[in-house]
Amino acid sequence: MQKLLIFFAFFAVKTLFAQTTEADYIFKNVNIITMLDDMVLKKKTIVIKDGKIIEISDKTKYKSSNTIDAKGKYLLPSMADAHVHLPESDEELEKVMKLNLINGVTKLRSMRGEWKDVERRKKFNSQSSYYPQLYLSPPPVHRNQEFSVDDLEKYVKGSKDYGFDFVKILSIKSPDLLKKLDSLCKKYEVKIGGHYPDHPKGVRFSDAVVFGTNYNAFEHLGGLVGEPESYENRIKNIKQNNIFICPTMQWYAIGYGQYGIDEMLKQRGMEYIPTEIKNDWAEKSKIYREKLGKEGFEKEKNEYAVEMQERFKVTKRLNDEGVKLLLSPDSSSKFIVSGFGMLEEMNLYKKANLSNFEILKSATTNFALLFNENYGTIETGKNADFILLSQNPLQDLKALGNIEAVFYNKFYLDKKQLNEIAKSVLPKSTVKN
């Protein structure tokens, strides 16, 4: 009897040990960019179970039927586009999500929302979906809106009850209305993001009012560019209030005519835009430039180039002050392709003299901090949400132009699967049998 008990005890321990050492995925021979610093952990093994990183080591005792030899590839957190405008149709939204996914973008922050977006998130962000996670705002507040006290409370409470992540201010009618909105946002614990409300040519808002609100993110370098008298005080307040900044410089570079039309048409990802749309973009740009005339266009372009230099300097200053930057090209503009525009935006951050590590941080770690999420760095206990690259992006950001694999929401998408996803969103005229 005693021998039988010993046998069962041994069998139970052996079974328990087997269960505890069985992992869902193991990646070996991988170079890890943790994003905790700019160092690379060479030839490591990373173990994943239940969607979490449970071990990073030189050699593991864990076993898995899904063991991937990374062969010296580089592993780092996947990216987030911090400023997107969701398309109207679900078909187009699915295409946008796929374009982001094949570029290693697994999070999208919607900045021009609709109430229906909550249902769209349920559709696309299920547990069995690899589509990027949506962070949503309801329809934005703008200066032409009239709110009664009851209407304003319904808006903020509804945003909270429906599960929106923040409310966006596009513009707002008055400082008094901002104070009332902010009071309700604090009551219902709703963050505010969006445009800096004060504008030299519009309604004026004191810095004391703006920085006393629940704003936790400003877009487009609003309140800083072209504001020399307020600049230093606002930098100080942004830093003290831990406000995140999303410059969206590619949107300005495109809109300010900083590129030639042919140059824009040759950008990465343009093959995913239907020919008729590209032709329309090119024709409208050509008509506008011809209307100004050669000298007129060059004058306008040069004036805007001066502003772009100011944007670079402001971005650099914010970064040097320790302000957390976010990253997005704002692909609502023509000539910017969802997902692909992320690298174009990074190239503009390079012109602002940010290091590759600082640029990558704006697209990974900082976004996780904005929403207090359990990703954005590669550490034990963090969500397994990362990409694989054949080259080191700390040395050259061009490495991000060739995503080898994506691990997200317990899905491992290798190069072949990413290529299939990419093929599925090519315009029909360009798909080869």
Image (cartoon, grey):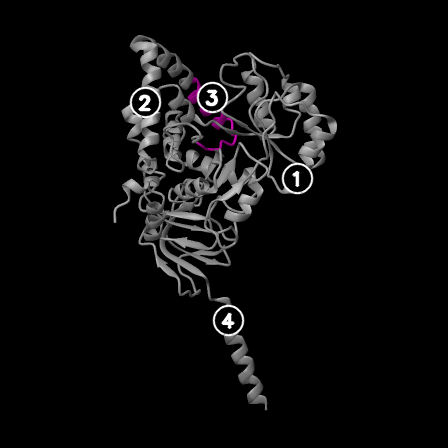
Looking at the image, residue 76 sits to the left or right of residue 153; the answer is left
Mark 3 = which residue? Answer: 314
- What is the spatial separation of the Cα atoms under label 1 and label 3, in whole angstroms? 34 Å
Earlier sequence position, callout 1 versus callout 2? 1
User: Which-is-in-front pick, marks 1 and 3?
Assistant: 1
Say whether residue 319 is magenta: yes
Nearer mark to the viewer, of 3 and 4: 3
* Residue for badge 2: 283
Q: CA distance from mark 2 to mark 3?
A: 33 Å
Give residue 17's mark. 4
Judge whether residue 283 is colored magenta: no
Please tell me how crowded label 1 is: few (under 14), some (14-19), or many (20+) other residues with Cα within 10 Å. some
Q: Secondary structure at mark 2?
A: helix
Q: Amino acid at mark 3?
A: Val
Q: Are marks 4 and 1 in contact (CB under 8 Å)?
A: no
Q: Earlier in the sequence, mark 2 or mark 4?
A: 4
Per the image, label 3 sits on a secondary structure element best described as helix
Horizontal and vertical percent position of residue 431: 28, 44
Distance from disc 2 to disc 4, alpha carbons, whole Å, reads: 67 Å
Which residue lies under the disc numbered 1? 160
Instruction: Give the distance between the C-alpha atoms of the residues marked 1 and 2, in whole angstroms.
Output: 44 Å
